[in-house]
Amino acid sequence: MIKKNWIYILFGISVIIFSVSKYLNNKTAFLEAKAVNLGNGWGAQIFVDKKLYITIDRVPAIQGNKSFISEEQALKVANFAIYKMNKKAGLPQITIKEIDSLGIKR
């Protein structure tokens, strides 16, 4: 009987430890986008917890090194990248179809 109670107690403690560790590991990072004037157009930077993570200095998914034509377009793509980063951890890949759906001029 005493062995059985210890098994239940140890199981309960392990469930609590597992739950707390899962909670502590799921901290969300603070993601922020800022527009950058490149001289020949616009780009954007994405910061994770106030540290530079990604610089977007050209329109993704198109050939060549074409900068964004406006600050608004650069921020729109950067914020979309943040949205994708929140859905799936890691670097986002943005397709030409997504660029078109965001209304970005090529």
Image: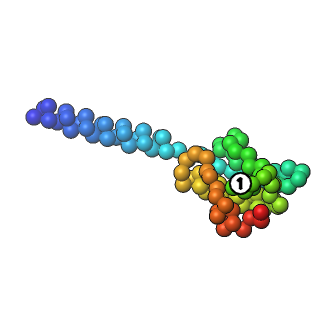
Answer with the quarter of the image where residue 62 lies: bottom right
Q: Residue at x 81, y 54 (%)?
A: 67
Residue that extends furthest to the left in the rendered view of this protein: 1
Q: What residue is disc 1 on? A: 60
Residue type at mark 1? Pro
Residue 80 placed where, x, y %? 65, 58
Q: Residue at x 49, y 45 (%)?
A: 26
Camera sees residue 66: yes
Answer with the quarter of the image where residue 50 lies: top right
Disc 1: CA contacts within 10 A as few (<14), some (14-19) or many (>=20):
many
Q: Residue at x 65, y 49 (%)?
A: 31
Residue 84 placed where, x, y %? 59, 55
Q: Residue at x 72, y 68 (%)?
A: 103
Q: Nearer the viewer, residue 16 or 105?
A: 105
In this rendering, the answer to whether 13 lies above or below 87 is above
Q: Could you tell whether 18 is left or right of 38 in the image?
A: left
- In the structure shown, which secondary structural element does the residue marked by tag 1 occupy? loop
Residue 69 placed where, x, y %? 83, 61
Q: Could you tell whether 85 is left or right of 40 in the image?
A: left
Quarter in which the N terminus is drawn: top left
Camera sees residue 50: no
Residue that extends furthest to the front in the rendered view of this protein: 63
Quarter in which the C terminus is drawn: bottom right
The structure's colour scheme is: rainbow
Residue 61 placed where, x, y %? 69, 55
